[in-house]
């Protein structure tokens, strides 16, 4: 959890997942930052578009860029993680099979390889860590993520209250609250987003979002057109005005650590 928090203040990190997954996704995330309320993003360092995404992000110094570890989508960075691979040789999208087969050693190896790829491409550490589909809710992925977080003193997403408690027990920095029920296709609207914000209490919270533009590289994704809907909402001036009216402070991990002091 975060220490040194101003009493009664509600602070919100708006994090866009999947940076670097596809050019259209990266373009939408950057637009949602420049013209909207997105304050941070997390990079899929194992994807072929990661380097280009980071190059574009260099023009946005107020956007935090963390690491979106993928254990279940795209190519593996390490060549020594057979327990994580599907029949096609890529990271296994069959989560039931993956959970039965994955080892701590392979999860740790792949996490460290993706972390090293991020540092190689960005020339710096990520600002924070989360995982694709929140796989760090379960061992062995949680153990791999916690090892990295503790080694480099990096915040990790608390994808649910139980995970938040486990991270706190491991002395891993995380938020007080996490919101992931906004982006469900078919339910996204300004009213839904504002209702989510209205429920936030004092403390530091993270809102997970997935803005972007549809493109050919999302052909295998069930979440395509909805990304553009989400982008429109995140750049809606009325949403920003509502946040200001409710005195919700938009923030990011780098600012929190610099101005509040953590641990």
Image (cartoon, rainbow, N blue to C red):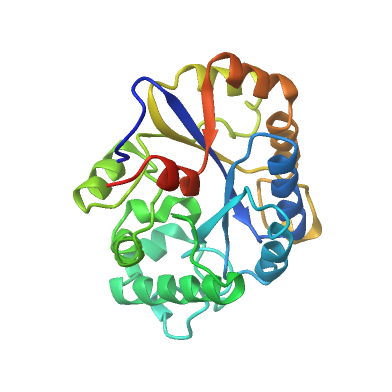
Q: Is residue 226 above or below residue 144?
A: above
* Residue in the image at 38% along x and 57% along y: 154
Find the residue positioned furthest to the front: 259
- In the image, 106 versus 89, the foreground residue is 106
- Quarter-wise, where is residue 32 in the image? top right
Q: In the figure, is residue 210 to the left or right of 238?
A: left
- In the image, 261 versus 169, the foreground residue is 261
Q: In the figure, is residue 121 to the left or right of 81?
A: right
Q: In the figure, is residue 87 to the left or right of 142?
A: right
- In the image, 152 versus 163, the foreground residue is 152
Q: Position of residue 216 (x, y in %)?
A: 80, 59
* Residue in the image at 48% along x and 76% along y: 116
Q: Is residue 257 above or below residue 229?
A: below
Q: Position of residue 80 (x, y in %)?
A: 42, 85
Q: Position of residue 59 (x, y in %)?
A: 73, 56
* Residue in the image at 62% along x and 17% along y: 242
Q: In the rendered picture of this protein, how many numbered marks are placed on residues?
A: 0
Q: Position of residue 96 (x, y in %)?
A: 40, 58
* Residue in the image at 39% along x and 21% along y: 201
Find the residue positioned furthest to the left: 169
Image quarter in which the N terminus is found:
top left
Find the residue positioned furthest to the top: 245
- Quarter-wise, where is residue 21 in the image? bottom right
Q: Is residue 139 above or below residue 200?
A: below
Find the residue positioned furthest to the bottom: 79
């Amino acid at each position: 959890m975060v220490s040194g928090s101003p009493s009664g203040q509600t602070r919100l990190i708006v994090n866009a997942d999947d940076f670097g997954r596809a050019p259209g996704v990266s373009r939408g995330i950057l637009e949602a930052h420049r013209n909207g309320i997105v304050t941070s993003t997390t990079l899929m360092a194992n994807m072929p578009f990661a380097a280009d995404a980071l190059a574009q992000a260099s023009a946005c110094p107020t956007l935090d860029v963390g690491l979106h570890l993928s254990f279940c989508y795209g190519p593996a960075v390490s060549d020594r993680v057979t327990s994580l691979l599907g029949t096609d040789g890529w990271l296994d999208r069959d989560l039931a099979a993956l959970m039965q087969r994955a080892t701590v050693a392979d999860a740790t190896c792949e996490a460290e390889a993706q972390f090293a790829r991020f540092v190689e491409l960005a020339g710096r550490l990520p600002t924070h860590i989360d995982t694709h589909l929140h796989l760090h809710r379960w061992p062995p992925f949680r153990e791999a993520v916690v090892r990295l977080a503790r080694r480099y003193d990096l915040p990790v997403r608390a994808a649910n209250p139980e995970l938040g408690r486990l991270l706190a027990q491991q002395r891993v920095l995380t938020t007080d609250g996490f919101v992931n029920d906004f982006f469900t296709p078919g339910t996204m609207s300004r009213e839904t987003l504002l209702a989510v914000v209205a429920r936030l209490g004092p403390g530091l919270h993270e809102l997970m979002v997935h803005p972007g533009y549809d493109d050919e590289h999302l052909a295998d994704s069930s979440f395509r057109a909805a990304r553009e809907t989400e982008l429109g909402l995140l750049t809606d001036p009325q949403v920003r005005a509502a946040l200001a009216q409710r005195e919700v402070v938009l923030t990011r991990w780098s600012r929190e650590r610099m101005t509040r002091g953590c641990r």
